[in-house]
Image (spheres, helix red, strand yellow):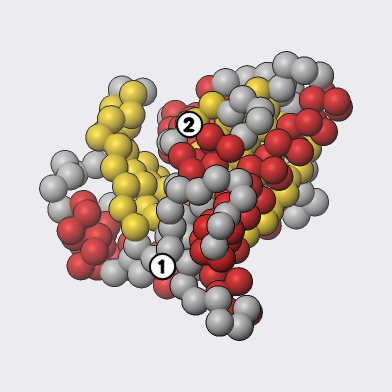
Amino acid sequence: MKLLVDIGNTRIKWCLLRDGSSTDHAAARHKGQLSAPLLTDLWSCLPQPDAVVISSVLGDAVSKEVDQWAQKHWGKQPCWAQAQAQQLGVSSAYAVAGTLGVDRWMALIGAHLCYGGNLVVADCGTAVTVDVITSEGQHLGGVIMPGIESMRAGLVENTFALGDVVEHETELLGRDTNSAVCSGTRYAAASLLDRIVLSMSSRLGPDVRCLLTGGDANEIQPLLITDFEQVPDLVLKGLAKITEGAE
């Protein structure tokens, strides 16, 4: 049994991999502070894994904290996934492969090996990232923009007298400043996804399949014109594939 972990900028997700099947999916917000007490709260009830495989976009301080916790409680040194030029049939578009976010790389591997075909892979969280991969496994590149909360935080910080933005459902056209910001930031993200799909359909053909993951996926999907399929655990799927490939 292996523990697979996806550490994002604000959330941590994990699951157990048993005999090729993932179970016990869970998630929690951490806001960049993965302390030992929080890890104890999250993982102390888990059975001891044979291995721990992690994708993390956070820095060395968090990696050290997780390493120490896993070694203290389970006697295991975690394996930290890294973006590569080529892996399991997927080729990176980046000239310096290691500068591609490991979460994006894991999502591309999971998407290619679990779904196949020409794919648009969108991850909507702290940042909105969109990557395109062909049926042959060639990553064509991607786009990054601030996520919904990041856009709103930027407006609050840089706009006089705006005040905090309170999340609520709204129509396209807001009737007060708060609802206008809520709508504008949601539709900005949705419009980016729709525009990329339109462009890639012209380039790759109409059979492009679109996958959507990330904490804000539920908020963005109803606004999309194009058909995106939600895959909440896409990074974990990629981790599972590289774990299986290493055996």
Q: Residue at x 54, y 70 (%)?
A: 153
Image coordinates of residue 106 in percent, x first then y, are: 55, 41
Looking at the rendered structure, the secondary structure element under dot 2 is loop
Q: Can residue 96 be seen in this view?
A: yes
Name the residue rendered at 49%, 30% in the picture: 230
Residue 50 x/y as whole percent: 26, 40
Q: Mark 1 points at which residue?
A: 32
Q: Which of 201 and 113 is in front in this view?
A: 201
Residue extending farthest top: 207
In the figure, residue 121 lies in which quadrant?
top right
203 on left or right of 221: right
- In the image, farthest residue toward the left: 45
Per the model, the C-alpha gap separating discs 2 and 1 is 23 Å
Q: What residue type is labelled 2?
A: Val
The quadrant holding residue 62 is bottom left
- Using the image, tell me which numbered label, if any, was put on residue 231: 2
Whether the residues at callouts 2 and 1 have beta carbons within 8 Å, the answer is no
Tell me the kind of residue under disc 1: Gly
Q: Which of marks 2 and 1 is nearer the N terminus?
A: 1
State the quadrant of the N terminus: top left
Q: Which residue appears farthest toward the front when viewing the image?
A: 175
Give whichever of 140, 216 is nearer the camera: 216
